[in-house]
Image: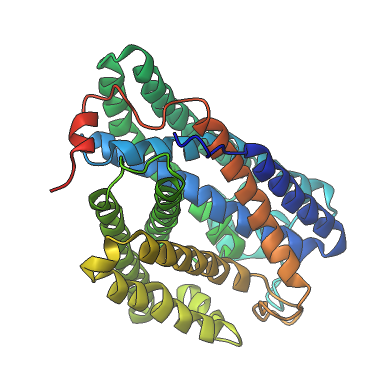
């Protein structure tokens, strides 16, 4: 570790608490917009930690050697998963203590009006989905999802950090076995979270590909954060001379691969719904072609797919820390915009029209406060974990091959 580099987790904790405090104020000032913004921020930041968990599991299941150094950084980010679970609690409190049970998930308020189509309780589509859309089952699933993520995250972290101390290969074997089970368990639970937290906002809509979209989105967000992290640690000294441009190129190549995968899933979802032309599916996209959402959808097509695709096709850019730092910031910005695009139009005004993102300039405060708050907690968890263990997994069986990864 560089002698002049001393991480300060407390400043990130302070930033996180400040952002969350602003969000809480928003619950009283603009309760519905603040609540939806809080959900967006929590989903966005949680997806980064989930993406890191997927990266670690993929590393172990393929017994990869090049990514051992990178894996350690992902393990630090997974330390945030318990805190993301805690940050989910205010959504429960808002639902039952805020005086509007359908403030987020409208189906929770049986008497809520469906804009000229009766109420939720009398809605045939709701009645057909009550096996899934019951409140006790919804909150139980949320607890189960976080329990699964926290368990596997803590297990991989424990195995990795324990191996630094005793060098036993049993930790590698344990992680490999847990990865085989965890890939299935985390994939299913992350899909359930996607259905509940986002699709459940507009329960009439459904898509069998939506869980895969959430997976692709989480991987892109995690890889963007990973690019920023390794670039920072190389620039500041701790990984200088350890992590080389070949490691960078491989992480960037993964980011490129998931750019293509995200585009494939997004297009396939749109094409299949457009081709089937079922009203219960097409209205979701119709809402996102109105007002500000139409240009935002175009920005996502060209800014979240085409530009990164053409940019990362170029080998020299994928081996340059500065160019990939720029691309990582770009990808994170587009990723956040994509979450807004998937969530916010589901909020309807008094006329049943999709909410327009920039209907009020002051809403930007609520949009950003939760992202800053949860993001600060994520970075606090990362740097706190970073300080407690080695910069690299010094006794991992594949560490030597990873350090020599130049070809």
On the image, the x and y values in percent for residue 385 come to: 52, 31
**Image height of 237 relative to 211, above or below:** above
Q: Decide if residue 379 is on the left or right side of residue 298.
A: right
Figure colour scheme? rainbow
**Front residue of this view, candidates 225 and 37:** 225
Query: Seen from this angle, which residue lies furthest front?
Result: 3
**Front residue of this view, candidates 100 and 14:** 14
**Front residue of this view, candidates 248 and 63:** 248
Taking the spot 68% from the left edge, 43% from the top edge, the residue there is 11
Q: Quadrant of residue 69?
A: top left
**Image height of 21 relative to 404, above or below:** below
**Image height of 64 relative to 94, above or below:** above
Q: Quadrant of residue 41?
A: bottom right
Is residue 380 visible in the rendered image? The answer is: yes
How many circles with numbers are drawn on the protein? 0
On the image, the x and y values in percent for residue 66 come to: 22, 41
Taking the spot 61% from the left edge, 87% from the top edge, the residue there is 291
On the image, the x and y values in percent for residue 245 come to: 26, 53
Quarter of the picture holding the N terminus: top left
Is residue 120 visible in the rendered image? The answer is: no
Taking the spot 37% from the left edge, 70% from the top edge, the residue there is 266
**Image height of 19 relative to 388, above or below:** below
On the image, the x and y values in percent for residue 225 come to: 45, 53
Taking the spot 42% from the left edge, 44% from the top edge, the residue there is 52
Q: Decide if residue 278 is on the left or right side of residue 337.
A: left
């Amino acid at each position: 570790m560089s002698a002049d580099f001393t991480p300060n987790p407390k400043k990130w904790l302070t930033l996180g608490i400040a952002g969350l405090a602003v969000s809480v104020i928003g619950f009283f000032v603009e309760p519905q917009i603040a609540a939806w913004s809080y959900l967006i921020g929590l989903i966005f930041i949680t997806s980064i930690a989930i993406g890191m968990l997927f990266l670690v599991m993929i590393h172990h299941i393929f017994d990869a050697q090049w990514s051992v150094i990178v894996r350690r950084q992902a393990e630090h980010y997974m330390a945030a998963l318990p805190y993301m679970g805690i940050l989910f609690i205010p959504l429960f409190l808002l639902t039952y203590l805020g005086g509007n049970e359908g403030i987020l998930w409208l189906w929770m308020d049986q008497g809520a009006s469906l804009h000229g189509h009766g109420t939720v309780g009398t809605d045939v589509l709701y009645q057909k989905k009550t096996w899934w859309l019951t409140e006790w089952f919804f909150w139980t699933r949320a607890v189960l999802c976080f329990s699964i993520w926290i368990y596997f995250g803590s297990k991989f972290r424990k195995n990795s950090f324990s191996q630094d101390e005793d060098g036993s290969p049993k930790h590698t074997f344990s992680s490999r076995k847990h990865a085989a089970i965890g890939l299935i368990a985390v994939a299913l639970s992350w899909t359930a979270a996607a259905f509940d937290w986002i699709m459940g906002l507009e329960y009439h809509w459904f898509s069998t590909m939506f869980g895969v979209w959430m997976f692709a989105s989480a991987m892109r967000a995690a890889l963007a954060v990973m690019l920023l992290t390794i670039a920072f640690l190389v620039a500041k000294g701790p990984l200088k001379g350890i992590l080389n441009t070949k490691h960078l190129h491989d992480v960037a190549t993964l980011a490129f691969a998931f750019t293509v995968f995200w585009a494939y899933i997004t297009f396939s979802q749109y094409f299949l719904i457009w081709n089937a032309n079922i009203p219960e599916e097409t209205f979701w996209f119709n809402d996102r072609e109105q007002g500000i959402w139409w240009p935002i959808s175009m920005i996502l097509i060209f800014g979240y797919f085409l530009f990164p695709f053409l940019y990362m096709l170029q080998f020299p850019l994928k081996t340059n820390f500065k160019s990939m730092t720029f691309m990582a910031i770009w990808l994170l910005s587009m990723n956040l915009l994509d979450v807004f695009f998937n969530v916010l139009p589901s909020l309807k005004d008094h006329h049943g029209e999709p909410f327009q993102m920039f209907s009020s300039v002051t809403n930007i405060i609520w949009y950003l406060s939760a992202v800053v708050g949860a993001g600060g907690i994520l970075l606090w968890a990362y740097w706190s974990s970073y300080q407690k263990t080695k910069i690299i997994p010094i006794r991992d069986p594949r560490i030597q091959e990873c350090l020599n990864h130049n070809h």
